[in-house]
Image: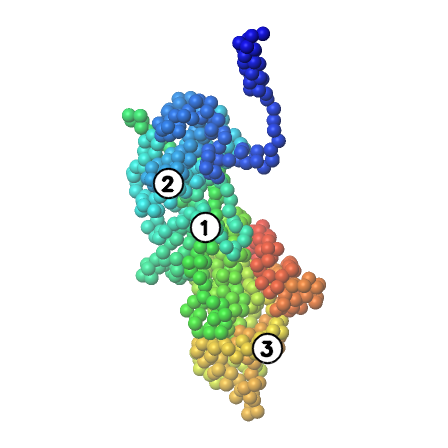
Amino acid sequence: MTTRRICTALGWCLALALLAGCARIGVKPVPMDTRTREFDRTALNSSLPSERSLVFVRQRDLETAWKADAESMLLGLDREARAQKDREAFFVLAELCYYEGKKEHADKARAASYYLSSALYAYAYLFDDALSPELDIYHPYSRQAMEFYNRSLANYALYARETGLAYADGRELPWLRGKVRLTGRSSQLAFAPDELESYHLAYEFEVVGLTPQQVRLGLGVPMAVVRQPPPEASRTAADRFTPKVRQTYAATLFLRFSPHPEAKTSGALVYDAALEVHDPMRGTSLTVEGRRVSMEYDLTTPLALMMQQSPEPNGLEGMMNPAAWEKLSGLYMLQPYDPGKIPVVFVHGLMSSPTTWANVFNGLMGDPELRERYQFWFFRYPTGNPVLYSAMTLRRSLDEVRHTVDPDGTNPNFARMVVVGHSMGGLLAKTLAEEGGDALWAKVSKTPLDALAVSARDKALVREAFYFGPRPYVSRIIFVAVPHRGSDLALGLVGKIGRALITLPATVLRPVASVGAALLRAMGPGARDKDMPGITGIDSLSPKNAMLQGLAEAPIVTPYHSILGDEKQGGRTGGTDGVVPYASSHLDGAQSELVVHSGHSAHEHPLAIREMRRILLLHLQQGAASPAAP
């Protein structure tokens, strides 16, 4: 065989070998996580579009054109998608526009145009019934399309905030194939758009210190909108109960697209877009093109942002120096009064403030029925004052809000009020459902109040503190770690130190001193100051305190529940939360009692929060209790 024939034969063998190699088909093992990551990859979570979109482009031999001139390729794909009414193509357009928006981050206006285009294409993929195949809402691609809509709209909102682009009716915004014309604005929030000071996207923050995060996925961009409090001159009567600080509300942004009549001119397409701001406290779904869609919201981020921007005064100061808190005391609503919702009033305990309820409020907000049926209020007071004095201010505050928002007493929702009290706050709450009067005064003095030689003003104040009756609008109370029969800590070193450091304000000290002096005179020449009981908030918690004993003996006429802490789970009769023993916090007449493995901050225990949720849902089911006589 000649050399030439040998070379020819070898060439054929090599060609056959190469052909055989090309024809080999098989598999190779890879880690399962690696393979699933390939399926999960999108332009949202990586530097590449999804494999699905890349395959779509390659099947149409558009990859080279896309890399050479992305905008021209996308315009051509848009025309093809509309001609063929191809839903799949609209998804690819949404993802590739989002991808191009990320690439164009240096040119903010161009990136914004791509993001608006992505939102529009994703909206069409989800809601245009003229496209085929029919939308499968259970397919993961539907959720991905919602994510492209949300994230694209979020990026456009950031662009608008950074550039000062405000809403204006008729304003035209550029997108890939034309203009988006703003044609309407609506808001479910309880204040006018011109009161909006700023807005933030929930996506911009990570929450610290609040759990769990009350977030639900869906359609729309969750936001925290900040309202500047109205000037004093324009505040309404109900505004007295909203804090004079920047208020932060949860909201969801939604942009509703629709083709503009006669929208096509010279190849350009015009869409109308209505800007909507939804309140997740009012509802959790959107109706779009006849479909009911879950709305995305985040309730925790706005709450955490508000607490960070407007920190609460220190609760220790409220105990040691009650005068510093006098102007801060009262009832506070996080949102304007809603006559269609039942009030739930939280009352904090010793050395504390309303922020102690943050995790409780956050946890209860996770239930949509509670959000839609209840409004949550908070009572702040200086805990160094005597309990009966603080309880009097609570009754005054609730009577005032009743007189302001329901003067005729005809709103059945107001009359179904629920009060939740932790520790000392439970003692204040109890006076809303008990009878004071002569029996309580007799615990302090055998001399009738009217017989004491004190000024009419001081006598009136003491009478208001001791002579009270159940409030007819309070229909249920939840006691959490409440020292109904006192705490031994008030007798020990902690009580002595605290008592020595507390400085009572003149508004409390003057009438108490006046009445105390009159009582000493009535007791005879042998009476001494040491014969008088202490008057600070800590003194009010002593098991030997006659006032506390009187409150413990009085019947509670309103349905109530108990939640108790036990730090060692040592059994109910011998248990304690480290501050209040079970024997002090237990009440025989409670409709329910739950003991959680916790210290004194039992109200923050997740099982305690679940129990409050259960009780509030039960309250809705059972209807209003029979109101007590005033």
**Amino acid type of the residue that numbered disc 2 sits on in the rendered structure:** His
Q: Which of the two residues, 320 or 540, is positioned nearer the viewer here?
A: 320
- Residue 8: where, in percent of width, then height? 54, 10
The label on residue 105 is 2
Q: Position of residue 188 (x, y in %)?
A: 41, 46
Q: Residue at x 35, y 43 (%)?
A: 159
- Residue 427 visible (yes or no): yes
Eye-nearest disc, 1 or 2: 2
- SS under mark 1: loop
Within-10-Å neighbours for mark 2: few <14, some 14–19, many 20+:
few
- Give residue 530's position: percent from left, percent from top: 56, 85
The picture quadrant where one finds residue 123 is: top left
Q: Which residue is at 36% across, 58% downward?
A: 229
Which callout, 2 or 3, points at the residue further toward the start of the chain? 2
From the image, state whether disc 3 or disc 1 is nearer to you.
1
For the residues labelled 3 and 1, the Cα–Cα distance comes to: 44 Å
Give how far apart the Cα atoms at labels 2 and 3 are.
63 Å
What distance separates the C-alpha of mark 1 from that of mark 2? 20 Å
Residue name at image x 47 percent, y 77 percent: 504
> Seen in the image, is 253 located left or right of residue 367?
left
Comparing 163 with 292, the one in front is: 163
The disc label shown at residue 493, or none: 3
The answer to the question of whether label 2 and label 3 lie on touching residues, with beta carbons closer than 8 A, is no
